């Protein structure tokens, strides 16, 4: 089911009793710079898709704290510098399988309106230690990463990030 991801629609559905939740996550478009070549990190998820690091904002966390925590939890990478640029996406989905059961047990909504803010993040680390949430990873140059990213939203985030980085005069 496709629904527009707008706060008024979410509030309306919530008011009439639908099992909805509005979630905010923070993501990292992690890259490393070697000479003139920039390589992006894509994580391979068990469902088969390739995407970026991302996760929920915990109570009391800033966006930066969430970004650093999620990056370390999902990749083991701690040496990062975050660029002051943000690309935001929104999407809607209905939880299925184990996620659905977990949400129902905890009393959380299963119709998820999701907003994710992604930041470019540079690292010098090659060694990635993926979490239990992933089955693999790959470093790719932009032209290959934009093809490998599974979802249109992820490709748009990568495209906007690459445009920003090309325009930035101080690639670290």
Image (cartoon, helix red, strand yellow):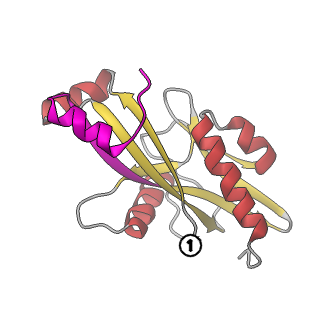
Image coordinates for residue 66, horizontal then vertical, percent: 38, 62
Residue 16 in magenta?
A: yes
The structure residue drawn at horizontal position 70% and vertical position 50%, both measured from the top left corner, is: 159
Residue that lies at the very extreme toward the right in this rendered image: 36
User: Is residue 47 at least partly visible in the picture?
Assistant: yes
The structure residue drawn at horizontal position 78% and vertical position 50%, both measured from the top left corner, is: 141
Q: Give SS at disc 1.
A: loop
Q: Classify residue 101 by image quadrant.
A: top left
Q: Classify residue 30 by image quadrant.
A: bottom right
Does 114 sit above or below residue 62?
above
Image coordinates for residue 103, horizontal then vertical, percent: 22, 32
User: Is residue 126 at least partly visible in the picture?
Assistant: no
Magenta extent: 1-26
Count the marks. Answer: 1
Q: Judge the density around disc 1: few (<14), some (14-19), many (≥20) Cα neighbours within 10 Å.
A: few
In the figure, is residue 63 to the left or right of 120? left
Q: Disc 1 marks which residue?
A: 84
Image coordinates for residue 157, horizontal then vertical, percent: 61, 49
The structure residue drawn at horizontal position 45% and vertical position 46%, both measured from the top left corner, is: 131
Does 2 sit above or below residue 139?
above
């Amino acid at each position: 089911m496709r629904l527009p991801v707008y706060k008024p629609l979410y509030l309306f559905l919530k008011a009439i009793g639908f099992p909805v939740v509005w979630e905010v996550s923070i993501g990292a478009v992690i890259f490393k710079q070697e000479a003139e070549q920039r390589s992006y990190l894509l994580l391979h998820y068990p469902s088969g898709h390739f995407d970026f690091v991302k996760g929920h904002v915990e109570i009391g966390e800033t966006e930066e704290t969430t970004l650093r925590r999620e990056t370390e939890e999902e990749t083991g990478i701690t040496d990062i510098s975050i660029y002051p640029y943000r690309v935001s996406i929104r999407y809607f989905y209905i939880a299925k399988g184990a996620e659905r059961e977990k949400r129902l047990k905890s009393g959380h909504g299963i119709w998820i309106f999701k907003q994710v803010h992604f930041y470019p993040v540079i690292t010098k680390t090659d060694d990635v230690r993926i979490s239990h949430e992933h089955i693999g990873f790959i470093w790719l140059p932009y032209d290959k990463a934009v093809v490998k990213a599974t979802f249109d939203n992820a490709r748009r985030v990568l495209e906007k990030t690459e445009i920003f980085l090309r325009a930035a005069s101080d690639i670290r």
